[in-house]
Every structure is written in structure tokens, then in C-alpha cells.
Amino acid sequence: MNTNDIREMVAKAQIEPAVTALIEISADDDLKQLSLEISRSYKTYKRNCIAGILNNDQQRQEMAIITYGILNLVSEFELSQIRILKDNVGLLKIEVEKSGMPDTKEFVNDLVEIQNGLNDANAAGSKKEIKPQVSEKLKSLHEKLEDPNSKESKIIKNIKEGFKIAGQIISIMKIVFF
């Protein structure tokens, strides 16, 4: 389950599964609490619709508020994950540089490019602001980190914290990007 799946659920008016998915992927207690509040609002909305308390205009307005709340939380979640991803990419870059291993320059340059691109998206306040070339670098990094035979994976194997950092990077990429 990733954030794009949640957006798709909202587009299909699958509110309960979208909120449940958001709660599941969220590690942040505040985000979970806000998701639970939206869930309660949706349940109240459904009860009021069944009871005939809301007219059509009120129903549309309530649903728009709930939908907006979910999409806003998804965007906030993505931004928090982009910040964490940027920090982890920076940590990995530092560890690779400190390792003193040969043939790491291209890998370090890619990490710098990704970190800068994520910084730009964070500053702009949206995942959509990630440039296509940075997205391609992210996808490539993801593939290389998951391929045990790639040069990058072999470099990481020789770094003490490499596996841990790479695992965190992969985890975030799966939730937010892929």
C-alpha cells in the first residue's frame, strides 16, 4: 500500500479503506490521530445520511471536507517521508564517502543529486515538485539497492550502517513513490 493507492481510493469514494490504509502506513502518532478523527467524521457523515439529517448539498459539502482532509493528510505524510528520505540519503552519502572504497564517486554524485532534488521538493511543499530526472535517479537507486549484485549494493555491504540506512530508504520509496 502506498500513498498513490490511497489517493486512488479517495477518487473512487472508498473513504474507509483509504483512512485505514493511511493509519497503517503512518508511523507518526499525530497523523494517526488525525486519520482517526477523519474516520470518526466519516462514520458520523454516514449515520447522518442514513438518518436523513443531511440534505444533498450538506452531504456533498461534508464529503468534500472529509476528502480534502484525507488528501491533505496524505500530502503531509509524503512531505514528512521526503524529509526522512532526504536525511537518509545524506547519511548514506556520508557513510559511502567515509568508507574510502574505490569507485564510489558516481554513487556519491547520484546521492547528492537525489538529496538536492528532495530538498527542492520539500521546500516547494509537494511530492509533485520532484523533477523527472530526480524521480528517475530515485527509481534507479531503488533498483540498485534491491539488487544484491549491483555495484551500489556491494558498496553498502561493506559499510557498517549501510544495510540499515538502505533499508530505510527502500521502505520510504515503496510507500511514497512506488
Image (spheres, helix red, strand yellow):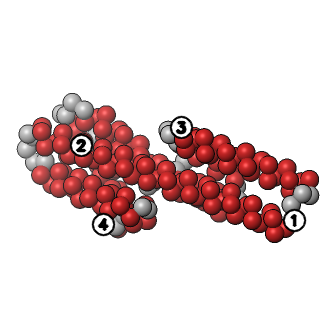
Q: Kindly indicate whether the residue at mark 4 contacts the one at mark 1 (C-beta within 8 angstroms).
A: no
The residue that appears at 60% across and 41% down in the rendered structure is: 33
Residue 93 location (% of width, % of height): 20, 46
Please tell me how crowded label 3 is: few (under 14), some (14-19), or many (20+) other residues with Cα within 10 Å.
Answer: few
Q: How many circles with numbers are drawn on the protein?
A: 4
Residue 92 tag number:
2
- How far apart, in angstroms, are the residues tagged by discs 3 and 1? 35 Å
Label 4 or label 3, whichever comes before in sequence order: 3
* Front residue of 29 and 109: 29
Instruction: Name the front one of labels 4 and 2.
Output: 2
Q: Kindly indicate whether the residue at mark 2 contacts the one at mark 4 (C-beta within 8 angstroms).
A: no
- How far apart, in angstroms, are the residues tagged by discs 2 and 1? 55 Å
Residue 133 tag number:
4
Residue 29 tag number:
3
Q: Is residue 172 left or right of residue 13?
A: left
Assign a secondary structure to mark 1. loop
Please tell me how crowded label 2 is: few (under 14), some (14-19), or many (20+) other residues with Cα within 10 Å.
Answer: many
Asked whether residue 123 is in view, the answer is yes
- How far apart, in angstroms, are the residues tagged by discs 4 and 2? 20 Å
Label 4 or label 2, whichever comes before in sequence order: 2
Label 2 or label 1, whichever comes before in sequence order: 1
Q: Kindly indicate whether the residue at mark 3 contacts the one at mark 4 (C-beta within 8 angstroms).
A: no
Label 2 or label 3, whichever comes before in sequence order: 3
Q: Outermost residue, right direction?
A: 52
Residue 159 location (% of width, % of height): 19, 34
Instruction: Name the front one of labels 4 and 3.
Output: 3
- How far apart, in angstroms, are the residues tagged by discs 4 and 3? 33 Å
What kind of residue is marked 1?
Asn
Residue 55 tag number:
1
Q: Is residue 64 left or right of residue 112?
A: right
